[in-house]
Image: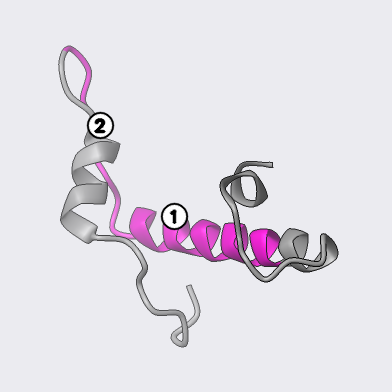
Amino acid sequence: MSKSKEMLLVGSKTKEALKGSGKETFNVSADALEGLNDYVYWLVEQAQRRCKENGRKTIRKHDILS
């Protein structure tokens, strides 16, 4: 993750979700949150692009999940 990117995720909640629960739990590496944060930034950029291409100023759910 570049130094200029602010963390968009809540670290403790994200780690908890990544670890899972029940029968199988996972360890979470130190760089996992950085990687996921980079992916979130990419998703945001894609949503902005789709919104602009569709002539809108409001990002909607389908812009993110498409």
- The part of the image, by quadrant, that contains residue 22 is top left
Q: Which element type, helix, strand or loop, lies under badge 1? A: helix
Q: Is residue 12 left or right of residue 8?
A: left
- Circle 2 residue: 26
Q: Is residue 51 left or right of residue 65?
A: right
Q: How many marks?
A: 2
Tell me the chief SS of the magenta region. helix
Q: Residues within 10 Å of mark 1 (few under 14, many from 20)?
A: some
- The part of the image, by quadrant, that contains residue 46 is bottom right
Q: Viewer-proximal residue, 12 or 47? A: 47
Precedes in sequence: disc 2 or disc 1: 2
Give yes or no for residue 12 being in the magenta stretch: no
Residue 58, position as x, y percentages in the image = 62, 65
Above/below status of 44 relative to 15: below
Q: Is residue 44 left or right of residue 5?
A: right
Identified at 40% across, 63% down, the residue is 34
Give yes or no for residue 44 being in the magenta stretch: yes
Camera-nearest label, 2 or 1: 1
Residue 18, position as x, y percentages in the image = 29, 39
Q: CA distance from mark 2 to mark 1?
A: 16 Å
Q: Viewer-proximal residue, 20 or 62? A: 62
Identified at 73% across, 66% down, the residue is 56
- The stretch in magenta equals 23-48
- The part of the image, by quadrant, that contains residue 8 is bottom left
Q: Viewer-proximal residue, 47 or 18? A: 47
- Circle 1 residue: 36
Residue 21, position as x, y percentages in the image = 17, 23
What colour scheme was applied to this rendering of the protein? one colour
Find residue 21 and name its label: none
Amino acid type assigned to the residue bearing label 1 in the image? Leu
